[in-house]
Image (tube, rainbow, N blue to C red):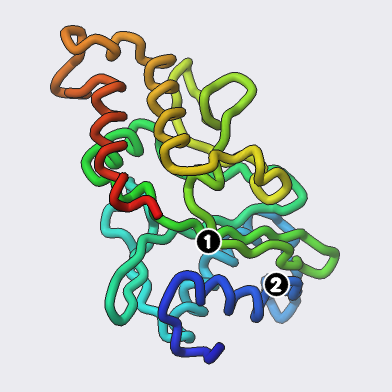
Amino acid sequence: MEHGNIQSLDEIEHLLKEDILHKGGNITLSIGDIPKISHTRDIIGNCIQEWLPQWFKDNGLDLEPNKSTQTFPDFIAHFANRSEMVDIKCWNYEQSPGFDIANFDSFYSVVYNNPAKLFAKYLTIGYSPTRHGFTIEYVNLLNMWELVGKSAKYPLSLQVKRKRPYAIRPINFSKYPKKAFNDPVALIQAVRAARILFYPEEVHAHTLDSAQTPYTPDEWYEKVYNSIQPLIK
C-alpha cells in the first residue's frame, strides 16, 4: 500500500500495522543537555495520540477534529468521496483498557438525535512500557459494540459515580473479544436496560421531565433501532 494515498479507515489500519505494530519507541525529555527517557504510562498514551494526527497528515489523510469537544467521536476523516467518524484510543496493553468511550448521558442524547454515530470507528492502539521506552503491541480498527460488553454488575460496561452511570467503558476487548456485543442492536438493548436500571422514573411517559429527557427508554430504543436498520450491513 502506498503512503500518501489513504482512501479509507481500513487502509489506515492496514498501514499502521505495517508501520508501527511490534515496533519500539521512546519519549525523551532533555533539560540542560541531560536527556531522560520517560516511562510514565499516561505520558506514553498521550504522546502516541499526539503523534498519530501528524502521521495521518504525512500520509495524506484529512483528519478534522470534532468542533464539539464534549461529544464523540474526536475526529472526522475526509476521503475523496465521503467522510467517516473515528476516535483514537490508546492504553497500556499490560492492563485492561481504562479509557472512556463516551459519557453515558451525552451518548444517550446524541445517538437519539444522530443514530449514525453508533457506527463511528475506534482506532485502538495498545502499548507496553519497556526499560527503554515502549512497544506497540496491538493495532485494530473496531466498532463501538466490539469494545463494549456486559459487566458483572450492569447491562453494559460502565463507570458509575454517585449511583449514576457516568461513562461507557470498554471491556478487555483485545484479550476477550467474544465478551463484546455482537452488533449495534445488542449495544442499544444494553443501553436501554441500563437507562431503566438507573433512571426508573423515566419508564413511564407521565413521569418524564420533558425539558431534560423527553422520551422513555423504550421510545429511545424504538427510534434508534428503526433508524439504524438501513445502516446495518
Q: Residue furthest right?
A: 131
Q: The C terminus lies in which quarter of the figure? A: bottom left
User: Residue 128, relative to residue 108: is it above or below?
Assistant: below
Instruction: Please tell me in which quadrant of the rendered image residue 26 appears.
Output: bottom right
Tag of residue 21: 2
User: Residue 198, relative to residue 158: is it above or below?
Assistant: above
Left or right: 102 as drawn, with respect to 91: left
Which of the two residues, 198 or 90, is positioned nearer the viewer here? 198
Q: Residue at x 51, y 79 (%)?
A: 55
The three-letter code of the residue at mark 2 reads: Leu
Left or right: 115 as drawn, with respect to 16: left
Q: Position of residue 157 (x, y in %)?
A: 55, 32
Which of the two residues, 35 or 1, is positioned nearer the viewer here? 1
Which of the two residues, 117 or 129, is positioned nearer the viewer here? 117
Q: Residue at x 63, y 64 (%)?
A: 139
Q: Callout 2 environment at 10 Å: few (<14), some (14 to 19), or many (20+)?
A: some
Query: Which residue is label 1 attached to?
Result: 123
Q: Position of residue 24 (x, y in %)?
A: 75, 74
Left or right: 211 as drawn, with respect to 102: left
Q: Are marks 1 and 2 in contact (CB under 8 Å)?
A: no
Which tag, 1 or 2, sits closer to the chain's start? 2
Q: Callout 1 environment at 10 Å: few (<14), some (14 to 19), or many (20+)?
A: some
Q: Secondary structure at mark 2?
A: loop
Q: Residue at x 59, y 66 (%)?
A: 48
